[in-house]
Structure formats: C-alpha cells, structure tokens
Image (cartoon, rainbow, N blue to C red):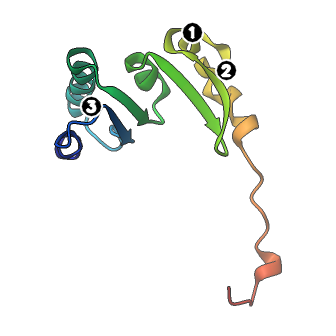
Amino acid sequence: MVAIARGLMACPTLLMIDEPFLGLAPQVVAQISQVISRLNRERGLTIVFIEQNVELALGLAHRGYVLESGRNILDGPSAALLQSAEVKRPSSLVPRLARPVPSLEPLRGRML
C-alpha cells in the first residue's frame, strides 16, 4: 500500500505495479484489489500491473496480455481470456513457455 501511495504522489495518469499481490495474505490481497479497482474507477487512472495470478489479474483488468520471453503470445479482453482454454489450464501454456535447462557441464572449472 505504501508503494502504491508513493506512486500516486506525483498524480500520474498511468501507474505500473509489479507483482502487487506476491506473498501477501488473502485478506491483504483483497484490500489491495479493492484499492486498485477504486483508483481506476474513481480517478480514471490507467493501471498496468504485472501479475502471475492469472485469474486475479484478469478479474481486475479490462484487458490482458500473456508474454513469453518478452513477446506477446495471447491478448484480448480479460473476460475473453478468462474463458480461453489456454488461460484456464495453465498447464497448456507450460509446453510453450518451458525451456530446457542447459547443461552446466561445459562450464565446469571455468571462471565466468
């Protein structure tokens, strides 16, 4: 909440928040969700947030984007994305997003 308040001190028209719900108790997540919704609704503030909790993020957002390695692989209205089979089952995104872990064997004994 303090970070959000600090960001609002400059009276921005756009506020970017990275992982606002990470590691928080459900009650605090609910409070921050309400604050984000009110800021958008009452102040007309555009809020861009980066969040791994897809259902929560799309529940708050008007529009969503799914990125893979910095590239947009899915986007659209949040209601449509929530109904998307790819978004509904996170495991469907895993094969597209997962990368094999490279072997460290060639680097053994080297100072990098």
Query: Which image quadrant for residue 35?
Result: top left
Image-based side of 53 in relation to 96, left or right: left
Please report whichever mark, 3 or 2, sits nearer to the chain's N-terminal start.
Answer: 3
Which residue is disc 3 drawn over?
Answer: 29
* 69 shown above or below 11: below
- Tell me the amino acid under the disc marked 1: Ala
* Residue located 16% across and 45% down the image: 2
Please report whichever mark, 1 or 2, sits nearer to the chain's N-terminal start.
Answer: 1
Which residue is disc 2 drawn over?
Answer: 86
Q: Secondary structure at mark 1?
A: helix
Residue 18 disc label: none
Q: Secondary structure at mark 3?
A: helix
Q: CA distance from mark 1 to mark 2?
A: 11 Å
What is the count of numbered marks? 3
* Percent of width and height locating residue 85: 66, 14
- Tell me the amino acid under the disc marked 2: Glu
Q: Residues within 10 Å of mark 3 (few under 14, many from 20)?
A: some
Image-based side of 83 in relation to 95, left or right: left
Q: CA distance from mark 1 to mark 3?
A: 23 Å
* Percent of width and height locating residue 37: 27, 20
* Percent of width and height locating residue 98: 72, 44
Eye-nearest disc, 1 or 3: 1
Which residue is disc 1 drawn over?
Answer: 80
* Residue located 19% across and 27% down the image: 31
Q: CA distance from mark 3 to mark 2?
A: 25 Å
